[in-house]
Amino acid sequence: MGSRKSKVGWYLLFTAPLLIIFTIVVIVPFLIGIYYAFFDWDGIAANPMEFVGLENFSTLFADDRFMQSMWLTVLFTVLSVVSVNVVGLAFALLVTSKLRTANLARTMLFMPYLIGGLILGYIWQFVFLDVFTLVGEVTGLESIFFNWLNNETFALFALVFVFTWQMAGYVMIVYIAGIQGIPGEVVEAAKIDGASNWQRLTRVTLPLLMPAFTISLFLTLSYGFKIYDVNLSLTGGGPANATELFAMNIYNEIFGYGNYGYGQAKAIMFFIIIAAITLTQVYITKKREVEM
Amino acid sequence: MLFNKKITAGLTVAAMLPVLAACGGGEEEEAAVEPGETITIFQTKVEISEQLEAAAETYEEETGVGVEVIGTTGDDYFQQLQIRLSNGTGPSIFSLQNATVAERLESYVYDLSGEEFTENIAPGMGLMLDDRLVGIPYGVEGFGIVYNKDLVDPEDIADYESFVSTLEEFNEQGINGYGLSQEAYFLIGHMSNYPFSLQEDPVEFMEQVTAGEVTLAETEEFQRFGEFMEAIRANTPSPLSVSYDQQVGDFVAGETAMIHQGNWSWALLEDFGVDFEVGLAPFPLEGNDKLAVGVGSNWAVNAEKEPEEIEAAIDFLEWLHTSEEGKRIIVEEFGFIPAMTNIEAEGLDPLSQAVLEASNSGETIPWSHNYYPANVVPNDFAPAAEEFFVNEDMTGDEFIENLDAAWQNAVE
């Protein structure tokens, strides 16, 4: 009996600091943010705050730039979730096969994730600007190799490309863990039963990888929606706002236009959308997980 | 059991202490210093950060008043300032870019009208809010076409026809005739200034545009400006992949004959080792033959501070603008073209010399962009200009219509 109570004390001891910090830097600002969303205010403490009720939320839906930004974000996220996971899974299958340089490859493929989005964006800006145009000139394939960042459509693809480059290595690690968790005897049994490589992949490996899919899809979905760093350093939202994604739109509303209250309303909407989509995704993929 | 509980409780409190202490730290520190003993400066011009720190040290030695210069990154200056002012760690002296910003920060700007040394400010150069003087100009700055004297004769760019044929000639020779760069102000901010400044009364004109009484698209200067922009787009490489540094670098390398820049670019030109003569010419919109000269930024005093600290801040500004050492710092260290009549400027670089001469003779057009709606250049004008440079089929007229829409969006 005594030991149980002291255990609770120990739990408290270790979680209390974290809880306090979490409350101060996440919960409290979040609640204050909701409060500000009902005001018309420019963010300068000395200037008046005018209560406008739900007006900020109703203007949201008539705001073309916000709607365009929402559509771009959805497009970006869908494209990147697909490409990141396909590439990540391919990498994982590659480095878990009997490849001689598997360990080296694993490290190399994970590297971009360590560099960080901001720097990666600047590096790729250089690649698109100088390397792409050079390759285009040399090979004559100027319809593919030109500066993607100056094209309103291709700039978004450039973002997807760089985001994939960054995240694929990360989800690869998740998939590797999943693949290594598949018991050898199951695969062995399938082999003896005469299953081909393809059948073993689609009928055994992939179904058993569902937990890894749940995590990877969740991560890429939420990262994709929230992306800001690569967006800022690679395109800066340009050309002509053609790549201004959600987070950047909110930042610009608050700090560019000085509409603090309206920007907060956008941020709340943003939170609700992300929460709804990612929770739905987790619910769906969870159901498809196979219990061993 | 009881014993255990006590220990846990004690440990929990102990674990929290550093957190609590960290929160309280800042206030204690501030309370220890008497107001007026030290002042803080937070300003926007990155180029003078080091020199300002040196000036602060000199001042501290002379008077015993501590001056702390807070580092700045330039780009997000206003946001940083806003955060500092809101959380009570605002500086005693800060920079105000223009009247629009002053209006937003109205409750923070101190009225400097009564101070004796401000009488030396060149006519019309002080930053006014209603009838109060709220900002002391850093200095005057000017921009126009910075050209390579080996390649360009100013007579060849004196009007639309000659300007365009010069661009076409350079295009044939494989030289970039006219370089802009991707940053909002260098892409469109300064350029858009001309059609506004050529109006009889630019500020009144802008008020009419805001009120919807007149549109840019129906104004002649803007229609001509659209034609200029078309000619620039047709005859030069896209500025969207060129940074400020590259723009100046290409100019120094002789790959660009003219760039649209101001006297501030001299520092960079010198860094890159420019080895030919450089001139500053007016942009020939509607035959314009005057440089655009104005004030880039202003010193302002924080009115929310203790009276002693305000007093100390004003003393520092007075020292900077009246003492021999202070005046020397402004001209030689900061490299400003003084906007004060009591400061002599000597040994200026060629671009600044051109600006000073224009400023003294009064042959200038104003900086209208100081009166634009807040942030309209990065928020709305830059995307419109990007769209214009990306879509080759967009006409100059359509571009001007987009600027109209951008303006209306900004004043909403």
Image (cartoon, coloured by chain):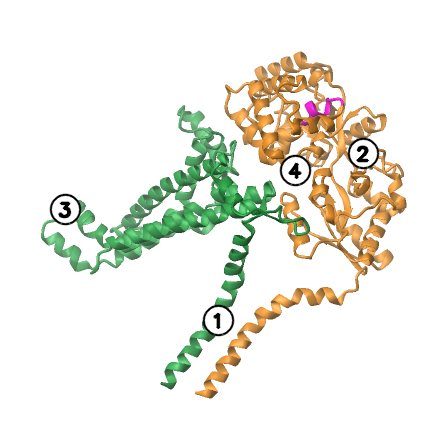
Chain colours: A green, B orange
Where residue B329 sits: x, y (%)?
Answer: 82, 45
Q: Which residue is mark 3?
A: A196
Q: Which image quadrant is residue B261 in?
A: top right
Within-10-Å neighbours for mark 3: few <14, some 14–19, many 20+: few
Badge 4 and badge 3 both on one subunit = no
Q: Is residue B92 magenta?
A: no
**Sequence-wise, which precedes: disc 2 or disc 4?**
2
Where residue A21 sits: x, y (%)?
Answer: 52, 65
**Residue B374 — which label?**
4
- Relative placement, left or right, of A284 versus B39 is left
Amino acid beneath label 1:
Ala
Q: Quadrant of the C terminus of chain B?
A: top right
Within-10-Å neighbours for mark 2: few <14, some 14–19, many 20+: some
Q: Of circles 3 and 1, which is in front?
A: 1
* C-alpha gap between disc 3 and disc 1: 54 Å
Q: Which residue is mark 2?
A: B348
Q: Which residue is mark 1?
A: A16
Badge 4 and badge 1 both on one subunit = no
State which region is magenta.
B193-200
Please say whether residue B48 is visible from this viewpoint: no
